[in-house]
Amino acid sequence: MYELPSIGLSAPNHSQTHSKLATVKEMPGRTEKDAELMRRIVANSDKAALQDIALHYAPRLKAFLTSRGEQSQTAEDIVQEAIIVVWTKAPQFNQSKGTFSAWVYRITRNKWLDYKRKNDRMQPTSPDILSVMVDDFVESTDVDFDRVEASIAVRKHLATLPTQQKQILYLSFFEGLSHSQIAQRTGLPLGTVKGRIRAALKKMRHGLENFQGVDQ
Amino acid sequence: MTNNREQDYHTVEEEWLAAYSAGRLSTAKRFILNCQAAINPWLSRRLETIDTVGGVLLETANGETLSDGFMSRIFDKIESIDTKPSNEITAPQVQVTSVILEHWMPAPLAGFLKNEQQPLKWKNMGFGVARIPLLQHGKEKLYLLKSRPGLKMPLHTHHGQEWTLILNGGYHVGNEGYLRGDLHREDESCTHRPLVDDHGEECITLVASEGGVKFTNPVMNLLKPVLGV
């Protein structure tokens, strides 16, 4: 059984009162460590590196899924599938295209959407068709966009956001709450919740315009 | 085809992009954003950036305890499927299709139509408007809508939200113009009368509608079952 220490961001336990909110801090060095572990996986098929990376992310990905209402066992099954994708698709991970955490976040989210689709009996269209609709994200191929610099900027900017704005982002991204659920949880008006998400992400977007390549 | 006026495009507000990243959008709305990202690389970059925010939050979140044997089950599965990470990229399956793909179709829409073997069979609704239903889930409908150049849509509002992605041609609402690659979101708080641009091109849009339209003219409301809106 793996138990990890709290590393800066604490979320309210659903069995507890919702009066407490998450706090978000920076985690320096994680990007570099992930990149090195992925390099070992690709170069040496290093299972110890896979275990290292899984032990950091799997408990968090499980929490990400149980926050969305999945049972413990289902959440673990989905996370296991995601970790296996990390292993099998490791050579396709390219740090210059983004951080490992964003990659595994996207893999897990898509696995979860895939699971929901297959288990949603109300869906009128065949699962294969919906698979095309949900997962066919077209990644940017723009070589002028420096994704490494961009991800560093995102991280720095996130660290400087006011606590309440970070908390709202956490509830939106990590716990998957709707805008009205966040309003209910925080006691803030719905418009304020939307406004704070919008303001935080807009600031980041403006900061990222510095990384659009030398010609712009 | 990509959009050359990348940074001037219309899309939904940041909180909806965050909902996309968090996996909270409906299938129809998610599909529309995938199509817009396929047309506009600028949106694609924005979605990548927002996923980076999700990744950073993930790095530092509190985890939940894993059950005994979690890693050994992963290693067992890895052993059963392969011995090492694969660098091979699976060749896409060649599919015989009778679907004719049009220049205005973004890749996800073309993929959907090919996969479903759904030919473009426009159903004429009158008034210079034609439609192809793609999906219905609950009350939300996803469909293609084609309008003749110069068409003045009747004044209307919406039940719930309506997301409209322009795939060909364009239209104006007041002074605001919407062209290929633009995404226009409206809800019940807005009453408007879109005017299709009259440059000789049909306006083709991909629409996700939560509850259909509500015309201000009661006669038009009587015609809604006929029009299918």
Image (spheres, rainbow, N blue to C red):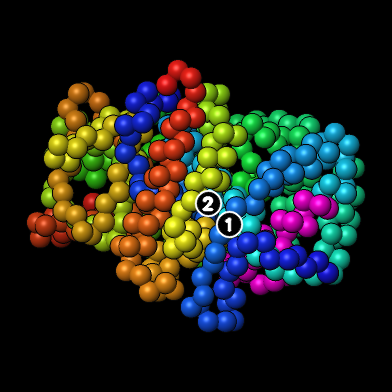
User: Which region is colored magenta?
Assistant: A51-76
In this view, the residue in front, B39 or B28, is: B39
**In the visual, does B106 lie left or right of B82?**
left
Rendered-image quadrant of the N terminus of chain B: top left
Which residue in the structure is indicated by mark 1? A25
**Residue lying at 19% horizontally and 23% vertically, measured from the top left:** B199
**Secondary structure category for the residue under label 1:** loop
Point out which mark residue A159 bears. 2
Q: Position of residue A30 (x, y in %)?
A: 69, 47
**In the visual, does B24 lie left or right of B197?**
right
Does A2 lie within the magenta span?
A: no
Depicted B202 relative to depicted B57: above or below: above
Q: Distance between the residues labelled 1 and 2?
A: 6 Å
| Chain at numbered mark 1 | A
Residue furthest top in the image: A215
In this view, the residue in front, B108 or B52, is: B52
The three-letter code of the residue at mark 2 reads Ala
How many callouts does the rendering have? 2
Task: Tell me whether the residue at label 1 lies in contact with that at label 2, contact meaning CB atoms closer than 8 angstroms.
Answer: yes
**Residue lying at 49% horizontally and 23% vertically, measured from the top left:** A213
| Chain at numbered mark 2 | A
Q: Where is residue B3 in the image (x, y as percent from the top left)?
A: 38, 26
**Residue lying at 84% horizontally and 46% vertically, measured from the top left:** A49
- What is the crowding at mark 1: few (fewer than 14 residues within 10 Å), some, or many (at least 20)? many
In this view, the residue in front, B32 or A175, is: A175
